[in-house]
Image: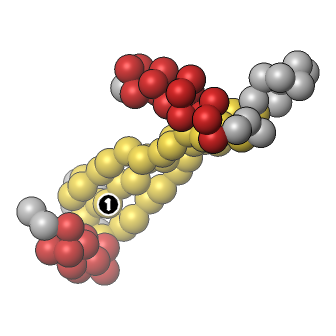
Amino acid sequence: MYLVQYQTLLMKQKSDGIFHATGVSIVIHPQNPFVPIIHMNVRYFELRDKTDNEIIDAWFGGGIDVSSISKQIRHNVFSPIYKTSL
């Protein structure tokens, strides 16, 4: 299904249902100044029917980023590690 069609369907269901979202955010601040700060978050979304409370749709989201390092190190060192771990 195309994204726009899915968004339209989701908005209609959202108006007819109960929407719930929760998430966790983690930030690592190493003591070593040469180790970058890492931020990661994970989110869970759920849409339930108002009448019978059954799940209409549910999905996960999230991301990770590294700060305080050069673009070259981020691209050559951390990006390949992220891609292979997925």
Is 79 drawn above or below residue 20 in the view shown?
Answer: above
Tell me which corner region of the image, top left, top right, bottom left or bottom right, holds residue 50: bottom left
| Residue at point 32%, 60% (across, down) | 47
| Residue at point 13%, 67% (across, down) | 2
Tell me which corner region of the image, top left, top right, bottom left or bottom right, holds residue 54: bottom left
Residue 7 at what x, y percent from top left? Answer: 25, 72
Q: How many marks?
A: 1
| Residue at point 54%, 34% (across, down) | 75
Pointer 1 local density, CA inside 10 Å: few below 14, some 14–19, many at least 20: many
| Residue at point 49%, 31% (across, down) | 79
**In the picture, which quadrant includes the C terminus?**
top left
Residue 59 horizontal side relative to residue 5, left or right: right
Residue 37 horizontal side relative to residue 51, left or right: right
- Given residues 4 and 71, the one toward you in this image is 71
Residue 45 horizontal side relative to residue 22, left or right: left
Tell which residue pokes out farthest to the left in this image.
1
Residue 42 at what x, y percent from top left? Answer: 51, 41
Whether residue 9 appears in this view of the structure is: no
Residue type pointed to by label 1: Leu
**In the picture, which quadrant includes the N terminus?**
bottom left
Residue 51 at what x, y percent from top left? Answer: 23, 68
Residue 52 horizontal side relative to residue 85, left or right: left
Tell which residue pokes out farthest to the front in this image.
72
**SS at circle 1:** strand
Which residue is identified by label 1?
47
- Given residues 9 and 82, the one toward you in this image is 82
Whether residue 12 appears in this view of the structure is: yes
Is 38 drawn above or below residue 15 in the view shown?
Answer: above
Is 17 drawn above or below residue 54 in the view shown?
Answer: below
